[in-house]
Amino acid sequence: MDWRSIQRKNFIRIEALCDFLALDKEHRSRVLSAPRFSLNIPFRLAEKMAKNTLDDPLFRQFVPLQEELAIVPGFTPDAVEEGRARKERKLLHKYPGRALLLCTSACAMNCRFCFRQHFDYETAEKSYETELAAIAQDPSLKEIILSGGDPLSLSNATLKELFCGLAAIDHVTLLRFHTRFPLGIPERIDTGFLELLAATRLQVWMVIHCNHPRELDHDVLRALKTVQKQGVPILNQAVLLRGVNDTFETQKALNERLADHGIFSYYLHQLDRVEGTAHFEVTQEEGLALIQSLRACLPGYAVPRYAAEIPGRLSKTILA
C-alpha cells in the first residue's frame, strides 16, 4: 500500500483515539480535547498502546494531556533560540561546517515534547531556490541536514530535486536526514526513495528519533535495513522523557535493540525546555546516573552521549 494512503489513517481527532484506546471517563478527563499543537498519530503506533491507561510510554509521547497547559518558569516557546540562527526562511546555521534545511513543516507524527511545536515555518513558498543559493555562496558548509517537520513527508520527486540541487554544489559532500517517519510508517522507505539514496554522489547519513524499544518492531527494522544496504549509516537520537524512557531497564533494552540491528546510539538528549513540556523533564542528575549504569553493562558503541543544546554554543554540550 502507498505510504500516503497509510498516512491518511493517522489519528487526528482526540475523541476517535480515546474510543480506540477504550479510555474511561476519568482518563478522558485528563486528555486535552483541544490542544494548540494538534494530535497526529500513525495507526500502527496507536495499535501498540495499552488500552485504558495514561501510563503507556507510547501514549505519553503522542497524546496531549492537561499537563501541557501548565505555565512553568524557564519553559519558553523557542527554548533553543533558533530564531537567531535563521539565515533564510528555511535555513538555520547554528554550527560551523553544517546548516539545517527546514524543508517542510509536516511530520508523520506530532510528538508532545517537540522543540519546534511553536516554530514559525515558511509554508507559502514551496521552492528552495533561496536556500540553495545561500548554501552555494558559503564554501564553509560541507554538510546539509534535512529536517523540518520531517523530510520524509516530502515526495520522492521533491526529494530528488533537493538531492540534485545539493549535489550540484561542489563543497557539499554530506547529506543528513533527521526523521521519525520510518518508526510510524515504515512503508515510506519505498523503492523510489532507495533509488535516490543509491544514485546520489553525496554521502548520506540517516538519524532516526526513537525513544522506546517498542517503536522498533520487525517492519520498522526491516525498512531501516534496506537503507543500510545502500551504504547509509543509521544513527539514533533519543530524548530523555519522564514516564517514557527514564528507567535503566528501558534504556538498556532500547540501546541493545539498536546495536543488535547495526544502528549507532548517537545522542540521549536532555529535554529542551519548551513551553508545555515540563511534565516530561528528567533531572540531569538522574540522566547522569542512567548513563553510568549503561556504561557498566553495554559496549561503548551502544551507550549514547548524554547531551544538551545550550543556545549560542557551537555544538551540543556533552554532559556525559
Image (tube, rainbow, N blue to C red):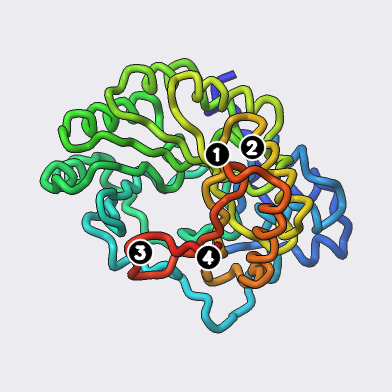
Q: Residue 82 carries which label?
A: 3
Identify which amino acid the numbered label 3 is placed on. Glu
Q: Return the residue at label 2.
A: 258
Can you give x and y, in whole percent of width and height, for residue 260 in the image?
67, 31
Between the residue at mark 1 and the residue at mark 4, the CA separation in whole angstroms equals: 19 Å
Can you give x and y, in whole percent of width and height, for residue 121 in the image?
36, 55
Which residue is depicted at the point 57% across and 55% down? 268
In the rendered image, which quarter contains the C terminus?
Answer: bottom right
Q: Which mark is residue 264?
A: 1
Which residue is depicted at the point 24% across and 39% down? 127
| Residue 165 visible in image | yes
* Earlier residue among tags 4 and 2: 2
Identify which amino acid the numbered label 4 is placed on. Leu
Q: Residue 319 carries which label?
A: 4
Mark 4: secondary structure? loop
Q: Which residue lies furthest to the bottom in this view?
A: 73
Identify which amino acid the numbered label 1 is placed on. Phe
* Earlier residue among tags 4 and 3: 3
